[in-house]
Image (cartoon, grey):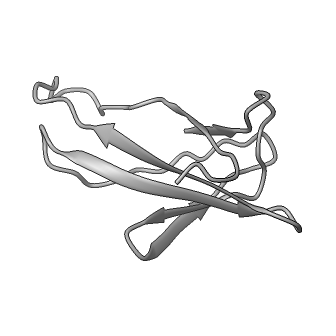
Amino acid sequence: MKVIDEQGHPIAGANIFQGKNRIGITDTFGVWNQFLSARIGSSVSLLVRKNNGKDILAAMKELPIPSTLILEQEPRIKTNVVVGIGHL
């Protein structure tokens, strides 16, 4: 997942939450890569938050898990998340 601002700039150091658990942080390029467990056909809700010193940038992202997967391959979901003030 790549976290960007409204102008398309990467957001480094953004915290990634699944529920109340912080599960990661974006790198210097705004990218977060992580394996997550999820049921086929379900979805995963993630919260992205970054305190930039004067404002809190945030966004929610719902990642749908496909209902059909090729079992011989590891499924990968790539997405972008745009964060901004008041995006929640």
Which residue sits furthest right? 53
Seen at 88% across and 68% down, the residue is 53
Hey, which quadrant is residue 74 in on the image?
A: top left
Query: Left or right: 69 with respect to 55?
Result: left
Hey, which quadrant is residue 56 in on the image?
A: bottom right
Residue 37: % across, % down:
27, 55
Query: Closest to the observer: 55 or 51?
Result: 55
Which residue sits furthest bottom? 20
Residue 75: % across, % down:
30, 32
Query: Left or right: 20 with respect to 56?
Result: left
On screen, residue 30 above or below 79: below
Seen at 11% across and 30% down, the residue is 67
Query: Closest to the observer: 88 or 67?
Result: 88
On screen, residue 40 above or below 47: above
Q: Exactly how many numbered labels are in the figure?
A: 0
Seen at 70% across and 52% down, the residue is 85
Which residue sits furthest front? 86
Residue 8: % across, % down:
76, 27
On screen, residue 69 above or below 14: above
Query: Closest to the observer: 83 or 74?
Result: 83
Seen at 40% across and 50% down, the residue is 35
Hey, which quadrant is residue 57 in on the image?
A: bottom right
* Screen quadrant of the N terminus: top right
Residue 21: % across, % down:
44, 75
